[in-house]
Structure formats: C-alpha cells, structure tokens
Image: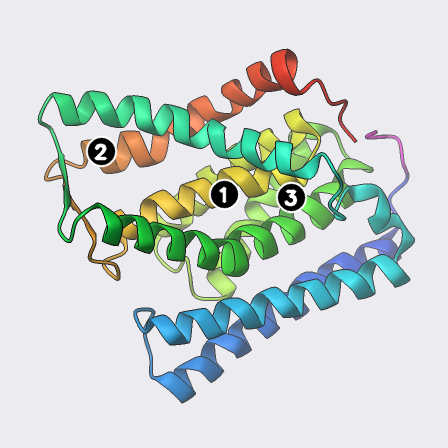
C-alpha cells in the first residue's frame, strides 16, 4: 500500500537511480556491440535476435541479484506465480480488443487497407517471431524495470497519481538514453504509452498485466509500421489506422477495459 507520509530518505533513492542508469548503460552497450558485429540498424533479424536474448538474460540475472540482495523487491510482484499468465492475457486483451474494434471500422470504411503480401502462413510466422522478440527485448525487461521495480518502489512512498506520472517521465528519459526516443513525436509516444501502462499496472496490481499490454502493442505495431517485416503491409495515407487503431484508441480505452476485466473476471486483489 502507498504511504504518502513515509519520510523522504535521500540514501534509499540511490539504489533505484543507480539501477536505472546501469540498466541503460548495459542496454546501450549491447546495442553498440551488436552494431559493431552485425552493422548498424534494426533490420538485421539475427542481430535483433542476439540483442533480444542478451538483454533478456541480463535482466533476469539482475532480477535474481535484486531479489536476493534487496528484500523490498520481493514485495513488488516481480516473481511470476500461478496467476501471472491470467494477468498477461488480461493486459493483452486490453490492447487487442479496442485495436481490433477500431481497426475493423476504419478498414470497413476504406480509410486504410492491410495486405497479406505473402499469404496467411507467412504473416502468422512473422507475427509469432515478432511476439517472441518483443517479449525478450522489450515487454518483459522494460516492464520488470519500470512497472515492476520502479513502480513498486515509488508506490510505497508516493500517491498513485505521482507514481504513474514519475515512472512515465523516467521511461521517456530511458528512451532518450538508449536512443529509442530522440525526437518530440517519439518522446510523446513513449509518454502516452507509459502513462497508459502505468494506469493499467495500478488498476490490476500486477506488472504482468503491463507486460501483456506492452507485448500486444509492440506485436501489432512493429510488423505494420516498422518497415522491417514484409508479410503485412499497411496502406494508411491519412494515418487513421496508425493513430486511432494502433495508438490513441487502445491507450485510452485499455485502462478502462482493465477495470472491467478485473471487476468482473479476474477478481484478484492488488499486491
């Protein structure tokens, strides 16, 4: 539970700040090393797979050290249990349902078009590949850091609104440090995404719901918008599908859907 009356102790903030800076440094180092070995750019699939596995292993090792030497981390719900899969599925549904609903309307009106350039099997195979890479490289590592450890640390000291806003700002700084958000539009995307996922984390009480939402978001957007996968092609001249179906719609409606899911289906008390 959040206790806003907990006194501020400067020393106790040293560990989480150091953790975030070290994580950003390791992330950046893995990226730069992969560029040296495979060449610059995202599109080399083997390079991306190596980066994803490397980051995932580093984060798991850091998590093991963290839980062992920082007992408070055990309270933050970082370790999966038998309910974690339900939380992941609830978070994924919170993105997929509004995205599919809004996207279907936009496609039906002819405002955008999605083409399966190489057929259904190729599209399914690429989506599965993207899903695995997203889980290893982005959804699990980033959520365990920001909506797991950092969120839990802040929530014990600050009100929920301050916790959600601060972890969102920290996520934007993270994106800037690792080179993923160096332009105003990317920073805005990072902020909106992290605000939405932060609210979902607060409502559900589980970092694994945040992982599910993040997983679904990245798995949907990378094949359609990234330009590195060719089995799906999005023709969206006025950005109706991009902005509403993939972006604003799920980010605004996702937290509301999580409220409905957890009130009617999951019924799991927040940690």
Task: Determine whether, in the image, residue 257 is placed left or right of residue 60.
Answer: left
Q: Is residue 18 visible?
A: no
Near mark 1 (Cα within 10 A), the count class, few <14, some 14-19 or many ≥20, is: many
At horizontal 90% and vertical 40% (from top left) the residue drawn is 7
At horizontal 69% and vertical 63% (from top left) the residue drawn is 60
Give me the C-alpha separation between circle 2 and circle 3: 28 Å
Mark positioned earlier in the residue sequence (2 or 3): 3
Mark 3 or mark 1, which is nearer to you?
Answer: 1
At horizontal 74% and vertical 47% (from top left) the residue drawn is 78
Residue 188 image position (x, y, % from top left): 40, 44
Q: How is the image coloured?
A: rainbow
Q: Is residue 244 above or below residue 82?
A: above
Give the magenta-colored segment's residue range.
Answer: 1-6
**Quarter the N terminus occupies:** top right
Disc 3: which residue: 147
Give me the C-alpha separation between circle 1 and circle 2: 18 Å
Residue 141 shown in magenta: no
Task: Determine whether, in the image, residue 219 is placed left or right of residue 12.
Answer: left
Residue 30 image position (x, y, % from top left): 52, 77
User: Callout 3: helix, strand or loop?
Assistant: helix
Disc 2: which residue: 241
Near mark 2 (Cα within 10 A), the count class, few <14, some 14-19 or many ≥20, is: many
**Quarter the C terminus occupies:** top right
Disc 1: which residue: 214
At horizontal 52% and vertical 24% (from top left) the residue drawn is 255
Task: Determine whether, in the image, residue 141 is placed left or right of residue 229.
Answer: right
**Which quadrant would residue 87 be assigned to in this image?**
top right
User: Callout 1: helix, strand or loop?
Assistant: helix
User: Callout 2: helix, strand or loop?
Assistant: helix
Q: Is residue 194 above or below residue 134?
A: above
Query: Quick one: 12 or 146, which is closer to the camera?
Result: 146
Query: Quick one: 39 or 7, which is closer to the camera?
Result: 39
């Amino acid at each position: 539970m959040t206790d806003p009356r907990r006194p501020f102790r400067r020393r106790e903030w040293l560990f989480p700040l150091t953790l975030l800076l070290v994580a950003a440094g390791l992330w950046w180092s893995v990226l730069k090393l992969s560029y040296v070995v495979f060449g610059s750019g995202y599109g080399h699939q083997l390079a991306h797979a190596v980066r994803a596995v490397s980051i995932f292993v580093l984060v798991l090792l850091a998590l093991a050290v963290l839980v062992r030497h920082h007992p408070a981390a055990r309270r933050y719900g970082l370790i999966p249990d038998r309910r974690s899969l339900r939380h992941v599925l609830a978070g994924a549904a919170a993105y997929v349902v509004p995205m599919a609903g809004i996207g279907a309307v936009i496609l039906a009106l002819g405002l955008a078009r999605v083409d399966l350039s190489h057929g259904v099997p190729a599209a399914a195979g690429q989506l599965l590949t993207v899903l695995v890479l997203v889980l290893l490289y982005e959804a699990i590592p980033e959520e365990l850091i920001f909506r797991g450890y950092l969120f839990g640390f802040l929530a014990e000291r600050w009100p929920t609104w301050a916790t959600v806003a601060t972890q969102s700002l920290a996520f934007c700084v993270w994106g800037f440090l690792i080179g993923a958000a160096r332009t105003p539009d990317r920073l805005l995307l990072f902020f909106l995404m992290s605000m939405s996922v932060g609210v979902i984390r607060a409502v559900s009480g589980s970092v694994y719901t945040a992982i599910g939402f993040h997983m679904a978001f990245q798995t949907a957007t990378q094949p359609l918008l990234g330009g590195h996968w060719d089995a799906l092609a999005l023709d969206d001249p006025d950005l109706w599908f991009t902005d509403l179906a993939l972006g604003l719609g799920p980010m605004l409606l996702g937290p509301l859907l999580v409220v409905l899911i957890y009130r009617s289906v999951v019924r799991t008390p927040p940690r």
